[in-house]
Image (cartoon, grey):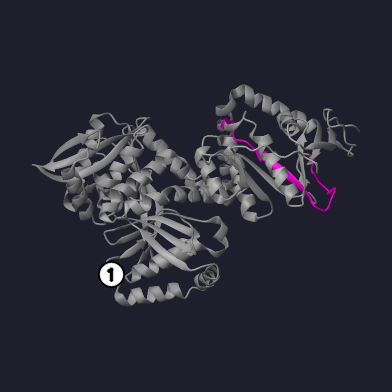
């Protein structure tokens, strides 16, 4: 067997045909094994991955492909490890061990010290080939279970009909479909052509980012490489009909998406998301149920693969599962023993929920510490610690309150526009401000608040549609002020409090805060409301921003703390508009 190495994947018709022929000959053909998938990864992740594609030949006949890559650290991995739910060496079953050993020998010759092979199917011939060939090629292998991927096996005609009826009979599905039907005509759409998919991708990515914010997480789609990958993948797979962007539409609103695949008898549930405004009706659950129902009626499909991830809803549909492995190969004995020991220790720790929780807390705190060091260095971290100690022992906080006057002058026209905040705005902001840690924390908080419906959110956007400032409003009565740890009483029955105003770091310095609260104050007053806003004395930029608007200072509240003794300060009379706000006991 002759093995050749490619350090870039050429756009070659013959290679594409030979590559995909091997993918289709695998014991379990997967779309992740195709030439198109590898090419999309190369285009999207060229800055972080260097392809190492090994081609095995017998004479001029291509009989094996191993699509690997080298990371910046020198570690070798599957090229598709971060994008594919299954990864493997491609060859006929009888040739697999010989090909795997030949590739590992080539890697050893290049002094690759560590090889990590993730998402390798446990039922693949490759897992046995690694066990047999690793030591001969000069590597020590440590393999462990990774994921159990849920699957819906369709079976015979009778089994399909039984499965379909069991899905349609689910009370949850019938209840949610009934409620959704009240809101508009329900349709299921599957777009497979690039001309259909391309216009939808931006909306899908924003919806995915917004949904993750609602769960307190950051979507992978806030990263440009990931969005580029999905676009390139759809462009490459669409001519063969292997990609399908499925949408569950109510009226003219898409309530759920699945960026998935239909390949070699498998319908793949790959990257789903939902519209948070319809979360109460489980549109994602309905979409999956309808896909299973349709697959039962289409003989060309043998299963619906639900892929990686242990989400609970998958168990309600699954009839089988497929395990994947995490394999580490080391040239040295000590790194091998360390990897094995680390896995044993992790297994023991997770055996106790209490210990696992403590470990996760330590890891989370360590991650936060690392993030703060990256943002400001040791000096900033030390200053932060001193401020926290000082606030714990001695603190004085004054909060100034401002009211929108009834006779405020008209707002000058501006190129920006203030509009109600919706999930699409949150998704767009998460994508644009993905590297702004403070912005991501604010957006998560906003997504949770928007989902609860307990306040009104607003966003200031530029003529290009870029969100540059966010603010919230709710009834003054019962407003809990965290700065003073007290609940407020409204000065009037129509009083509204503007709060939690935020400008991302890269958008600061342009007066967006003052502009946004001026527009909002005018809008609320036009609705018959009594707008108020506040600023802490320690937040000079906020107070100065408010002073640039028609909002007029009315009173202040304060709190003093000395060791364990606290003293609240009463409100004070309004100061003249020309004076700087002063708090008086």
Q: Is residue 30 visible?
A: yes
Quadrant where the image shows the C terminus: top right
Relative to 355, 241 lies left or right: left
Looking at the image, which residue is at 90% across and 37% down?
573
Is 383 placed above or below 86 here?
A: above
Q: Residue furthest top?
A: 379
Q: Nearer the viewer, residue 362 or 313?
A: 313
Which SS class for mark 1? loop
Q: Nearer the viewer, residue 37 or 22?
A: 37
Q: Is residue 351 visible?
A: no
Magenta range: 484-506
* Membership of 501 in magenta stretch: yes
Badge 1 density bin: few <14, some 14–19, many ≥20, Cα 10 Å: few
**Quadrant position of residue 80:** top left
Name the residue tied to disc 1.
Answer: 299
**Quadrant position of residue 164:** bottom left
Q: Nearer the viewer, residue 47 or 460?
A: 460
Q: Residue 141 in the image: state x and y as whole percent.
A: 32, 41
* Membership of 222 in magenta stretch: no
**Quadrant position of residue 60:** top left
Quadrant where the image shows the N terminus: top left
């Amino acid at each position: 067997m002759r093995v050749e190495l490619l350090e870039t994947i050429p756009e070659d018709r013959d290679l594409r045909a030979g590559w995909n022929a091997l993918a289709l000959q695998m014991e379990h053909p997967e779309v992740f094994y195709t030439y198109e998938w590898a090419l999309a990864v190369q285009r999207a992740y060229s800055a972080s991955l260097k392809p190492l594609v090994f081609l095995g030949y017998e004479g001029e006949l291509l009989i094996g492909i191993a699509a690997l890559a080298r990371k910046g650290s020198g570690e070798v991995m599957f090229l598709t490890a971060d994008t594919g739910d299954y990864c493997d060496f491609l060859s006929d079953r009888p040739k697999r061990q010989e090909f795997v050993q030949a590739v590992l020998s080539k890697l050893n010759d290049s002094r690759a010290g560590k090889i990590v092979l993730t998402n390798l199917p446990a039922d693949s011939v490759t897992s046995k080939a690694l066990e047999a060939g690793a030591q001969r090629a000069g590597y020590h292998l440590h393999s462990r279970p990774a994921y159990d991927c849920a699957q819906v096996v369709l079976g015979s005609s009778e089994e399909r009909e039984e499965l379909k009826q069991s899905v349609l009979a689910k009370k949850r599905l019938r209840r949610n479909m009934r409620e959704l039907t009240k809101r508009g005509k329900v349709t299921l759409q599957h777009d497979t052509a690039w001309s259909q998919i391309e216009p939808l991708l931006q909306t899908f990515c924003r919806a995915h980012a917004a949904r993750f914010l609602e769960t307190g997480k950051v979507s992978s789609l806030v990263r440009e490489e990931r969005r580029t990958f999905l676009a390139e993948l759809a462009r490459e797979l669409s001519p063969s009909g292997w990609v399908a962007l499925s949408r569950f539409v109510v009226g003219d609103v898409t309530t759920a998406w699945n960026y998935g695949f239909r390949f070699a008898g498998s319908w793949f549930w790959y990257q789903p998301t939902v519209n948070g405004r319809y979360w109460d009706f489980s549109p994602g659950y309905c979409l999956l149920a309808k896909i299973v129902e349709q697959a039962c009626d289409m003989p060309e499909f043998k299963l619906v693969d639900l892929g990686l991830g242990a989400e609970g809803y998958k168990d309600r549909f699954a009839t089988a599962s497929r395990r994947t492995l995490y394999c580490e190969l080391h040239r040295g004995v000590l790194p091998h023993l360390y990897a094995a020991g680390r896995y044993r220790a992790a297994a023991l720790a997770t055996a106790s929920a209490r210990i696992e929780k403590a470990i996760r807390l330590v890891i989370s705190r360590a991650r936060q510490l690392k993030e703060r060091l990256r943002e400001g260095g040791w000096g900033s971290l030390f200053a932060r610690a001193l401020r926290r100690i000082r606030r714990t022992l001695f603190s004085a906080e004054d909060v100034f309150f401002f009211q929108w006057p009834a006779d405020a002058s008209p707002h000058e026209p501006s190129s920006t526009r203030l509009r109600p905040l919706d999930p699409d705005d949150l998704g767009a902001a998460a994508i644009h401000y993905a590297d702004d840690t403070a912005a991501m924390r604010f957006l998560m908080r906003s997504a949770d608040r928007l989902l609860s419906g307990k306040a009104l959110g607003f966003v200031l956007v530029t003529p290009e549609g870029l969100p540059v400032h966010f603010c919230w409003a709710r009834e003054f009565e019962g407003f809990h002020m965290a700065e003073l740890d007290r609940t407020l009483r409204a000065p009037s029955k129509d009083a509204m409090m503007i709060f939690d105003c935020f400008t991302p770091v890269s958008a600061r310095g342009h007066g967006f805060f003052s502009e946004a609260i001026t527009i909002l104050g005018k809008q609320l007053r036009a609705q018959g409301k009594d707008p108020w806003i506040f600023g802490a004395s320690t937040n000079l930029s906020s107070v100065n921003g408010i002073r640039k608007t028609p909002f007029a200072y009315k009173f202040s509240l304060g709190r003093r703390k000395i060791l364990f003794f606290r003293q609240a300060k009463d409100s004070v009379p309004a100061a003249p508009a020309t004076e700087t706000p002063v708090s008086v006991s």
